[in-house]
Image (cartoon, helix red, strand yellow):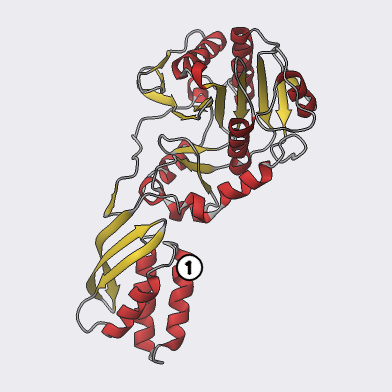
Amino acid sequence: MVILLSLKNCFQLHYGLKIPAAGFRCSANSGLIIQSVSSDIYQNLAVEDWVHDNMTLEDRHVLFMWRNSPTVVIGRHQNPWQECNLKIMREKNIKLARRRSGGGTVYHDLGNINLTFFTSKKKYERMENLKLVVRALKALRPQFDVRATERYDLLLNGNFKISGTAAKLGRTVAYHHCTLLCNADRFLLSSVLKSPYKGIKSNATPSMPALVKNLFEEDPSLTCEIVMDAIAAEYARCHKIDHCITLINPGDETVFPGINMKTKELQTWDWIYGKTPKFSIRTCFNMVYKQSLLEVKVDIQVKHGRIEACNIDLPEQWLPPAMCSELEKNLTGSKLCPSETAALASTLLRVCPQNYELHSKWSLLCETVMTLM
């Protein structure tokens, strides 16, 4: 059952804050089920941060259910260039987000359900949460073959991954979150979770590819709403609380003081790209110029998402060495970002000799380098 209540009043009944905030009280009630009305990834991740940072969960539990518009979400220690196709994502306006937890890269859209289980650190138990989801699915469709694995995934029919897991353990509070593929766009999922970038050397956490399937493909009558209600019902039964889902607005500062600052931080370039572990790109590619095939070698060192060092090896005499050196010099210190590189290239082009052939070669080289970004 979904109810529209003032979450502020609901929290007054259920929880105390670690930090003082007017209107919040603590009581003996042991559980709460909340669902976001937002489909914005940054707002929903900010709810996780806010609950983790501000609520005391000793002997209490929270289930947070949420869905997002098309987004790729990478783990805390991952490399987006290594994990996804940024070019397709830019073309299709698919967001990129970095979460606070570890784990691998996942694709979200409105056909994917996200579940976050908050507890005290002492009561953190991923497998129990996954078993709860399995029981909820079995209650809906007893014929489903759904199992939790030792890697904390959920498999359908023994082969198809329908859920992946990640977690964050704080000093006293922990959360475990997982996806659940209900009716996601599997074509888009496979397209964006395949990096086209070659020659990357990195110590970032790699994702583990897996065959995936939607619950909808097994039973077209299942919707996200039906599945979420079943999970909420099982959660309420386990924790002996009312089966009530409270809808929340993650942008409401009267309920979540300071949450909009958390949302803004999660959207910044420095968080999404700048937290990428140091890596290098060493690759070579062919350029076609006037029916000639030219081999170009590129060696780029990247730290905090910015180019730390750059070397471009071109065929002798194809471009004046000074022009290539100027490009390398200006790329150093810049973001590994096509829009920033395009702006740099345009600026440098205006000061180079007014020669059509040089301009054509310069533009081709810059466009080729940008394909690495």
Q: Position of residue 207 (x, y in %)?
A: 36, 37
108 to the left or right of 103:
right
Q: Position of residue 290 (x, y in %)?
A: 28, 79
291 to the left or right of 94:
left
Dot 1, how many residues are within 10 Å of its Cα: few (below 14), some (14-19), or many (20+)? some
> Image height check: is 121 above or below 70?
above
| Dot 1 amino acid type | Glu
Q: Position of residue 78 (x, y in %)?
A: 39, 44
Dividing the picture into quarters, in which one does residue 74 lie?
Answer: top left
Residue furthest to the bottom in view is: 354
- Residue at 41% over, 40% down: 190
Q: Is residue 130 visible?
A: yes
The residue closer to the viewer here, 85 or 15, is 15
> Image height check: is 330 above or below 111?
below
Dot 1: element: helix
Residue furthest to the left in view is: 316
Q: Position of residue 216 (x, y in %)?
A: 52, 24
> Image height check: is 211 above or below 277?
above
Residue picked out by circle 1: 340
- Residue at 29% over, 58% down: 281
- Residue at 59% over, 11% down: 234
Where does the N terminus fall, quadrant-wise?
Answer: top right
- Residue at 28% over, 72% down: 288
Where does the C terminus fall, quadrant-wise?
Answer: bottom left
Dividing the picture into quarters, in which one does residue 194 lie?
Answer: top left
